[in-house]
Amino acid sequence: MKILVINSGSSTLKYKLFEQNKSLEMLCGATLKHSGNFDETFEQVFQNLKEGGFIQSIDEIELYGHRVVHGGEEFSDAIVVDDEVIAKIDALCALAPLHNPANLEGIKKAQAISGGKPQIAVFDTAFHQSMPPKSFRYAIANEYYFKEHIRRYGFHGISHEYVANQAAKLLQKPLSECNLITVHLGNGASICAIQKGKSIDTTMGFTPLEGLMMGTRCGDIDPSIIFELYRKKKSIDEIERMCNTQSGLLGICGESDFVMIEKMIDDGHQDAILAFEMFTHRVKKYIGAYKELLGDVDAVVFTGGIGENSARVRLHSTTGVDEQKNQNVKFGEIQKDGFNTKILVIATNEELLIAQKCVMLASNKK
């Protein structure tokens, strides 16, 4: 059985083809740029699959898995797409205007060309639906939650769930017995507190803007800054653009690529040093807070492009890191000998988790 996993974004479409035999194996994958024309992009996907010899016909693909960024409070797990699901995803577009419309277009296009094969939606917010009200509610009047659905949703849930499962395997414990802090650091960054396998808190909130300092996003700021800028005649669009695309690492040192920032640090660039210190300070602060929430922590898990590849960030983001292990690791433990909490590096694989959920749902339907 072949499963095509699709992540259709506003400017790119990422895909990976998996095959389920005795185990689930990735056959190929790529990222294609598009200008909103999903017809041409999907044609290119299937052309690539055929030219690479991975399929002879589109009919060989039995399942389609789709990453959907925002599932609101409607979805707490993967689901087979039908008209009702499409309507609910569409209604959530206002909460994720940069992501959900493109995700939905990918689903509709795949529906149109797949000959009725099942389309399965997997939501980035679903893993965090286990958060209790004390974590997801904002301290604003009740009406804004009950009428406007303003609450903390959390994101990167597919990644946090995947690495949590991998960490449990490394720890040789059931996930339901694990307390973990998963640290997804990339251009977008978030941390999740996982208690007995369930998300109980995470740094991103109503949107992916809250929480950590990121590549171009500001993360946590005093809301009064928005009011002050507005009073100084900055438009709402300008302020939103500033917070999302002109802040974070880019705003402090003029660069958001962490490889370049580390080179700038080595050259003594003071703004890059400050950006690094601000970034790791916030990561360490949230890890510390989540340790207090969880009490006993089995492992702190680093993942994402920065979390997996920057030994310098890992070293400065939490205590107990063994410098030699940290320099050489690609997967596994990096804590000092005798340190109570494991510190792990695990590469995320969101597409694999989506494929696994597709197979599980298909099996349950039989």
Image: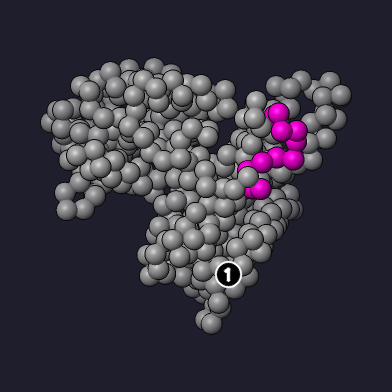
Residue drawn at (44%, 51%) of the image: 161
- Local SS, label 1: loop
Residue drawn at (62%, 40%) of the image: 152
In depth, the one of 72 and 156 nearer the eye is: 72
Q: Is residue 285 left or right of residue 199?
A: right
- What residue did someone put label 1 on? 296
Magenta span covers which residues? 134-144
User: How many neighbours does mark 1 have within 10 angstroms: few (below 14), some (14-19), or many (20 or more)?
Assistant: some
Extreme residue toward the left, this view = 56
In depth, the one of 17 and 143 nearer the eye is: 143
Q: Position of residue 273 (x, y in %)?
A: 70, 55
Q: Is residue 27 left or right of residue 125?
A: left
Task: Give the answer, above or below, for where 323 lies relative to 6.
Answer: below
Q: Position of residue 299 (x, y in %)?
A: 51, 66
Residue drawn at (48%, 45%) of the image: 127
Q: State the scheme by which the image is colored.
A: one colour
Report the quarter where the N terminus lies.
top left
Amino acid type at circle 1 is Asp
